[in-house]
Image (cartoon, rainbow, N blue to C red):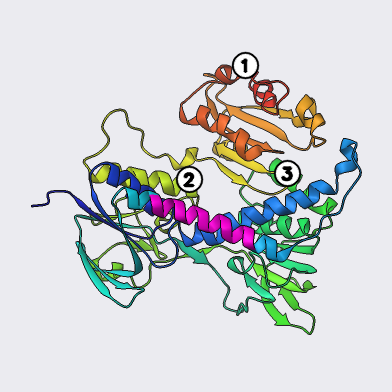
Amino acid sequence: MNSKKKLVIIGGGPAGHAAASSAARKGVDVVLIEREVIGGAAHLLDCVPSKTMIATGGAMSFTESLSGMGLENRSAEIDVAALTLRIEDIKNQLSSDVSRLLNSQGVTLVNGTARLVDKNTVHVDAADGTTHTFEADDVLISTGTRPRVPNFVTPDGDRVLTTRDCYPPRTFPESITVIGSGVTGVEFAHMFASFGAKVTLVVSRQQVLPGKDPEVAAVLEDTFLARGVRLFKGARAVGLERTETGVRVICDDGRISETTHAVFAIGSIPNTEGLGLEEIGVEMDGGYININRHCQSNIENIYAAGDVSGKLPLSSVASMQGRKVAEQIVGGPRGPHRHLDYDKAASAIFTEPEIADVGLAEAEAFASGRKIRVTKVPFSSTAKALINNDSRGFVKIISDPATGEVLGGSIVGRHAAELISVIALAVTANLKVTDIEESLMVHPALAEALAEAAE
């Protein structure tokens, strides 16, 4: 008789495959059901391709600034076929690596569409036309999200695009209107500007990246304006018309943006339809599954992780949630344990310059009346930034003035996504600014700005 616990996971993105791998290592019998691509559609069809194109666009931009490094400028041209192949190769390699790992751990992989019959039974319509029924002690829902599109738009994959139509688009835009100025929107504005398109960014608030540190947003806005990006601040797109040469985006304040293409980056919709969750009584809010700190829904053996949980839509958060679920279903962690604190998750925006932050934000602290110490060091004071011919941006560290504990920080500049890890570790481990200050950093390195900001 098989006494192993049985876990069925619906959705093979970062949350699902992290949970599957971790649970399998702990001796759980795992079935992972994925209808699109192992590795996750949002991850491999959105995140990875966009960052691949941003890297290629960044290389093009770099070639245009060679004279500042004592070299002759060279112009690079887009090879669309080669770029498409590069994106596909990276996506396929990452998916294959995950599949190979899970197969080696004995995880059963099923390509198909799943729904819950009851809290312990999952029915699957497989892609090969067969049907399967799996009994489970525990079920994890990690089905992710898909791009949201307003009701006045019908994307055609040609001129009117969702984010998933852009890797790369059928034709590279001469000009493009990006609707949405959150993380995805500003990344797309940067990406297409890097490829030489004339970009208009529709900004519904009075700054890009609403909710982020205004100083951080200001650096990005200045960079956009210097690159010729038009900012429609305080405007909302309310209509779209096709023209002979492209599209016309109509805003609620009367402004109109006429470009060859338009892309909508206005958030996501959770993939929870058709899973049978309502029928078995799982509580949801706007399609997102309500969870507790153990990632459990109101039904104890049904978990949710990743974007569908309504928490931070970050792959790193999804993976950690998946590992926490695996711990929980085998009886909880063995040894020291720290509950997942979403307020301490580091995030990055892959624009030029890069932006990253973690923990308590300066504006948030002031709004709540909390006393903080803020120290800021520009990269222009470091030798490495001057060597790189890119001194834009700064490091900002927020700490408790009484204890010196690091509470958060922001970085704007080259390699910000890597450098933020130092502050993220400090925030997570409750380190003090003196722990960063007294670390012997490499010289010359951008990380020296971290030690200076910690003084």
Membership of 287 in magenta stretch: no
Question: Is 65 drawn above or below residue 204 in the view shown?
Answer: above
| Mark 1 closeness class: few <14, some 14–19, many ≥20 residues within 10 Å | few
Cα distance between the residues tagged 2 and 3? 22 Å
The image quadrant that residue 454 belongs to is: top right
Number of on-image labels? 3
The image shows residue 286 at horizontal and vertical percentages of: 42, 65
Name the residue tied to disc 1: 440
Precedes in sequence: disc 3 or disc 1: 3
Could you tell me the amino acid type at mark 3? Pro
The residue type indicated by label 1 comes to Leu
Residue 11 makes an appearance in the image = yes
Q: Quadrant of the C terminus?
A: top right
Which callout, 3 or 1, points to the residue nearer the camera? 1
Mark before the other along the chain sequence, 2 or 3? 2
Q: Residue at x 77, y 31 (%)?
A: 385
* Residue type at numbered disc 2: Ser
**Image x and y of residue 41, in percent:** 48, 62
Nearer to me, 8 or 395: 8
Residue designated by label 3:
353
Q: Which residue is mark 2?
A: 316
